[in-house]
Image (tube, rainbow, N blue to C red):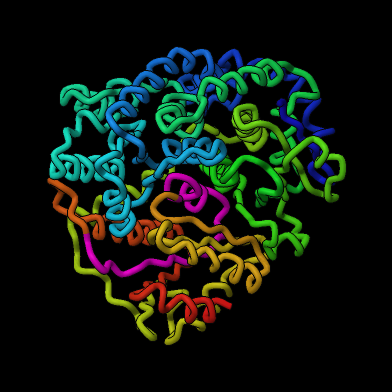
Amino acid sequence: MSVKVVATGAAGEAVERVVPQLVADLVASRVTSLDATLWGAGAEEEASKRLGWTESVAVSLPLVPDILALRDKLVSLGVDHFVLGGMGGSSLAPEVITKTHGVELTVLDSTDPAQVRAAIGDRLATTAVIISSKSGGTVETDSQKRIYEEAFSKAGIDPLERIVIVTDPDSPLDVSARAAGYRVFNADPTVGGRYSALTAFGLVPSGLAGVDIEALLRDAEAMSLTLAVDEPENPGLILGAAIAGTKPLRDKLALVEDGTHIVGFGDWIEQRIAESTGKNGTGLLPVVLPVDAPELNLELADMQVVRLVGSYDDTREVVPGEIEITGSLGAQMLTWEYATVVAGRLLGINPFDQPDVESAKVATRSLLDDRPEPVAPAFAVDGIEVRGTANVLDGVSDVATAVSTLLSHLDDDGYVSVQAYADRVGLPELEAVRNVLARRAARPVTFGWGPRFLHSTGQFHKGGAPVGVFLQITTSVAEDLAIPERPFTFGQLIGAQAAGDASVLAEHGRPVLTLTLTDPSAQLPALLAALG
């Protein structure tokens, strides 16, 4: 199945105006031929080593037999449960691929001690773990590897037989894992993490879990010629123009899964767009919305709605002003990758770097190295501890007023970012916060689980337009979990990640309110009341 994109309203006008120029500039064929000059001189060095994703199908097909052979071996040893330890692009694509194909894969993209403990306690005797890290130095992934090595060893299971490594060639993880005797799959180093869905990072976890990964690659392959041709019908050019060519720019991109068979696709697109475009004070902010989101009834001038629909028939009638897209998974993944780099060209930014992601990591490392005493709350009400920037908390003594003060900083072109540093498996009800705040704020509201969003929208929060207000929701650690051979625990790690990101946002002049739930299940009703 190919991909169909229909754009109406301002997006449709952008397509009519911009696509002919993209065709005349040979953008599609130049992307495919690895032309690093498309995004300007400042981006050329990075782009020259980050266009390998256009060749992912050809590079990845030879991996398929090895992946399937390893799956057969693991299954023959009694393995029936696969866990993925990874962050950002290393986890988002496999999660979408496996869910869409109805295949079980436990995705551990958290440092919350309760979530980590639950994963380790789930069928350990019949579990195999894939540890994925492009850089090989991701603190979350390193911690996940350490805890599983310890758990397997304590259970009398050789970690070398149950842990599989996916990383770039010659990364620190590649070197250490090979020296230790682990099975290692190397990914193409010319592909950035968020473009890695069709590389070893997407394929090894998905294939081991049971997905027909050759069919996924063939699906993308069938789409690749269409995306490489400089024609007005090219869906990559159409989509890129529709999302980044509107005048004035509609820089809030509402992603609505409305009939698509692809499960969780909005989260994958979110990382791709936010981390690729949110820099230099500009970019597109993806806002993943349910079909009943309050924002969809507000006709916001700066929000472009993109509906991910189920079939060609669904695109015959499109809500005026909206974009609809349909297609199979492999074909859409490749289309969105092309559209992202087209959007980068139109916005005048480098779609391959992430200059502001490192700042939160630095702040986290500093807190872990120094481990200062926790900052005392400004006040606490009914067990909810309140912290935040001075422009939010000065003169405030209750949660409801703190929320009102935070939202008072919201401009007509602003957005609210909710960041939940919590167990996303054990506390899914926290997502209800998003709709409650959206009804009150009448502006786009994003929701991200920490620390996973730091590898996604975190770049936009610091590098994009400075119009966000930030609500952190953290939870007290009821029972911490040690990280083997590390001087800090999982509880201290996730606490440092939340505090570190809050400090960086504050340094950027962003209003931040942090609410810590000491008993999340009991305090959620009071929290929702204060937010509403």
Can you say which quadrant of the picture contains the C terminus?
A: bottom right
Give left or right: position of 135 versus 401. left
In the rendered view, tell whether residue 3 sits above or below residue 530. above
Residue for point 80% across, 35% down: 312
Residue 479 on the magenta span: yes
In the rendered view, tell whether residue 405 sits above or below residue 454. below
Q: Residue 305: x percent and y percent?
A: 72, 50
Q: Residue 2: x percent and y percent?
A: 72, 26
Q: Residue 302: x percent and y percent?
A: 72, 55
Q: Front-most of 484 and 40?
A: 484
Can you say which quadrant of the picture contains the N terminus?
A: top right
Residue for point 54% across, 81% down: 529
Q: Front-most of 491 and 357?
A: 491
Q: For residue 147, which quarter of the picture?
A: top left
Residue 71 on the magenta span: no
In the rendered view, tell whether residue 113 sits above or below residue 263. below
Q: For residue 518, which quarter of the picture?
A: bottom left
Magenta range is 453-480
Q: Front-most of 293 and 189?
A: 293
Residue for point 51% across, 83% down: 401
Give left or right: position of 186 versus 225. left
Observer able to see residue 131: no
Q: Residue 113: x percent and y percent?
A: 28, 57
Observer able to see residue 171: yes
